[in-house]
Image: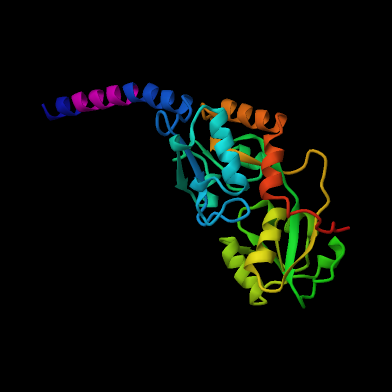
Amino acid sequence: MFNSKIKIALVALVAIVAIGIPVLNAQKSSGCGQIKEGVLTIGTDDPAYGPWFDNNEPSNGKGYEAAVAYAVADKLGYSQDKVEWVKVPFNKVIQPGCKNFDFDINQVSITDERKKAVDFSSGYYDVSQTVITVKGSKIAGAKSVADLVGAKLGAQVGTTSYGTITDVIKPTQAAAVFDTNDVAKQALSNGQIDGLVVDLPTAFYITAVDLKDGLIVGQFPAKAGGEQFGLVLSKGSKLTKDVSAAVDALRADGTLAKIADTWLASTVGAPVLK
């Protein structure tokens, strides 16, 4: 009797598992859907830095990325009152799995490695990595990449800025890694590092607003088919195609250029490192 009950239980368990397998497989193959019907949910980091955002308030539509986000929303058919923002740390954005946003906009560079975990839209901004420091620093007068080799440099963890240090500059000292740019800026102010690598608009903002005696050392030469920021979506998202089409349309009709003129016009003219 006891053995019969065990056999019945095992048969039932096998049946349940067999039924569940197609359901799980269907979920895996279906991709990640929209978070809320009739609402576009957009993610970004906290704090959201200038000149990409204004006053850490993405919903006000001010700043380059906030303006781009609402322009994309408009192309997708969402009015501003149908957009909701959620805060997502940078490192979580590029991890595998379905997200709590429809797309994220947070200066995330498109790379082949990241494409293994997430989807990207077409690029909405062409990136130039830049080195910043403070007056009196050993690299304040640097003119070339070779002048940076002996410096202690830092960048935010998981960023292409960090990759620029390790793959392009290749300094003799190990690069310092920071959880956020706020922590990195403090390290630079305290003299723990000689320089910090960030994208060009962020470099202008930090040296003008956040960093006492801050200055831009130089930017790295642009390359054909070079680095771009893209909107991040869950891998296999049903929205990827439409979001990319929206970005392409904004580039083609000149909207991205107009937004850049409005919010990034002051971030030009940095010297190019040889």
Residue 150: horizontal and vertical position, in percent?
A: 80, 70
Coloration of the structure image:
rainbow
Relative to 240, residue 94 above or below: below
Residue visible at 84% across and 68% down?
142
**Residue 163 seen from this side:** no
Relative to 227, residue 3 above or below: above
Residue visible at 48% across and 49% down?
88
**Residue 183 seen from this side:** yes
- Image quarter of the N terminus: top left
Residue 210: horizontal and vertical position, in percent?
A: 62, 67
Q: To which quarter of the image does residue 207 belong? A: bottom right
Q: Is residue 205 left or right of residue 236?
A: right
Residue 217: horizontal and vertical position, in percent?
A: 79, 65
**Closest to the observer, 54 or 217:** 54
Q: Which residues are magenta?
A: 7-18
**Closest to the observer, 241 or 125:** 125
